[in-house]
Image: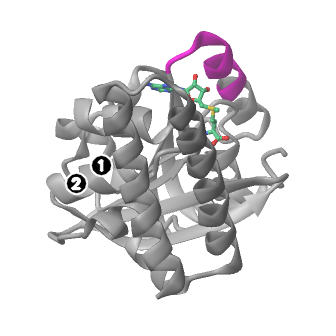
Amino acid sequence: MNTNHLSERLAMVASFVPQDTVLADIGSDHAYLPCYLKNIGKIQRAVAGEVVKGPFESARRNVQLNGFSDHIEVRLANGLLAIEPADKVETVTIAGMGGTLITTILQDGMKRLDGVKRIVAQPNIHAIAIRQWAMKNGFLIADEEILQEDGKIYEVVVLERGIAEYSDADLLVGPILRKKNSDVFQAKWEREMCEWKRVIRALEQAERTEEIQKKKTEIEQKIELVRKVLTA
Ligand code: SAM
């Protein structure tokens, strides 16, 4: 992967960035995503935010090497603190982290989201946290995609301003992914169900405490939700 060629995962994130937008890429690492988007003429300008010094320096180097220093500003900052109101950011991308961390970044930086019209989130796990956060914070799920790369399955969740109510099943599997019902979607949830069933078998071997029983019931409820989705 480099600034001319993204992984399929990041290319999917890039595909949801609107033409001519002002972008903030949070957790930018090498800044591959904003550099690629500038390279293909898709963004006006961008902020690349990174909290760790090594990746921050690597992002800054890549931006300089590509000659994009006038259009991509690399900032060492925690989460959305990388964004200033004067940036007039319209689109935020946050990719390659867990859903819970992405949600914490969004929640902690809520005030910096004023003026942001679209958030493109690519959680490596636990996408449910992002959907739950959206529902509680005035965003709706505008689009979703799922893809498989190098044996791993990734979800991309696109949020826009709006009010929507989602069922427990929608929050877990994704309201749009569920409608698209792709082979990768089916494979993901069959995989998850296998894992949950393995955990249940392990719990059945353990001592019968209230806590274990509660855990088992929670997993059984998730299996039932997903079973209904897959057979609908
Ligand atoms: N976004 C790139 C991608 O999808 O390929 C890089 C993903 S990398 C696995 C996650 C990056 O997020 C790391 O460089 C990490 O330092 C950065 N990160 C983690 N927490 C962060 C935070 N609170 N604010 C900014 N960056 C963060």
Q: Quadrant of ligand 1?
A: top right
Would you say residue 57 sits in the magenta stretch?
A: yes
Query: Left or right of 62: which side holds 154?
Result: left
Question: Residue at the spot x=28%, y=64% of the render?
Answer: 168
Residue under circle 1?
88
Counting the numbered discs, the total is 2
Q: Is residue 152 magenta?
A: no
Q: Residue at x 26, y 39 (%)?
A: 86
Instruction: Give the amino acid at mark 1.
Output: Lys
When asked about the image quadrant of residue 192, the answer is bottom right
Disc 2 to disc 1: CB gap under 8 Å: yes
Q: Residues within 10 Å of mark 1 (few under 14, many from 20)?
A: some
Give the mark toward the camera: 2 or 1.
2
Q: State the CA–CA distance, disc 2 to disc 1.
A: 7 Å
Q: Which segment did they paint magenta?
A: 51-59
| Residue identified by numbered label 2 | 115
Q: Please tell me which residue is depicted at 35% across the width and 47% down the height of the picture.
A: 218
